[in-house]
Image (cartoon, rainbow, N blue to C red):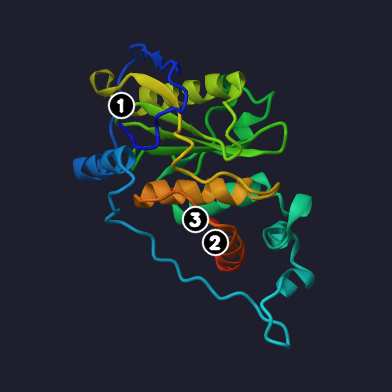
Amino acid sequence: MWDFELSDSEDEKTVIVETSPVKPLEQDSSCNSEDEKRVASTLKSCGQKSTRKRKLEIASCREDKNGSKTDIACKRKLPKKTSHLSKLLKTGVDGWLCDRIVFDYLGTVLPDCFIVNPMVWVANFNLDKHGILANRSDLHEELVFMPICTDANHWVLVAFDATEGYVIYFDTLGEDIIPAYQTKAMKIADTLLKQHKPINERPKLKFKNANRRVYQKQEDGDSCGPLICMIAKGIFEGKNSLKFSQDEVRKWRRETYDLMMNADPPKLP
């Protein structure tokens, strides 16, 4: 049982979905059982450290002439392809992260995880017609992250462990998931199992709200995007705590700006 999967509500009901039989697909030979065991263990406990931490060279934030580390970097005119990154150095409504930042960041720092493109949560996006847009085509780590920008311009996160079948929901405002998003998240999880696992290896899908006591509660109106990115990275790395201070959020914004300005777009496998 994951430490962060238990809901605060004792009358919370677990949603269990039986996956229907389909013809098994060939498995990716590059994925070994040791990787799968490590990911499953990481998600069951926040206390286990990852053996595959990402080591990223992140440039320091820029300084003005007085040596003050301000947001001066975003005042210069950015190339059109990177102009959206200036949101990382702003606050309030101007600091709300767009889909592109969240998707590109998670794909860059978690390249072995399956990151679902936030575009699939648009109301008129048809999964049956367009499929599941993502950063990769396989379940190498058997760990799936689904960042969702709701209609209220609020970022939430669904984490799916394809080994154990747990679909866990994180909302830094402490709200329950919107039913339509839950339905689509379960459909995505079910589809991925059918596509990538033989029928005898598919777990039952179980939906839970993450225990709100073990991850960060939002303290302002613009940190939901950074927090769901930090939570996803923390889950993958097996961090003991999924709580982050406002100073850590501001630091994440500066470092992510420098990282994404200098990083090439994540490559598809």
Residue 115 appears anywhere in the view? yes
The first of marks 2 and 1 along the sequence is 1
Which residue bears the numbered disc 3? 108
Secondary element at image label 3: helix
Q: Residue 152: x percent and y percent?
A: 72, 33
Distance (Cα) linking label 3 and label 1: 25 Å
Which residue bears the numbered disc 2? 248
Distance (Cα) linking label 2 and label 1: 38 Å
Q: Kindly check if marks 3 and 1 are in contact, taking CB atoms under 8 A apart as contact.
A: no
Residue nearer the viewer, 187 or 25: 187
Q: Residue at x 69, y 63 (%)?
A: 89
Q: Residue 227: x percent and y percent?
A: 56, 49
Which residue bears the numbered disc 1? 197
Secondary element at image label 1: loop
Q: Residue at x 64, y 50 (%)?
A: 223
Quadrant assignment, res 42: top left
The first of marks 3 and 2 along the sequence is 3
Quadrant that contains the N terminus:
top left
Q: Amino acid at mark 3?
A: Thr
Which residue extends farthest bottom? 65
Distance (Cα) linking label 3 and label 2: 20 Å
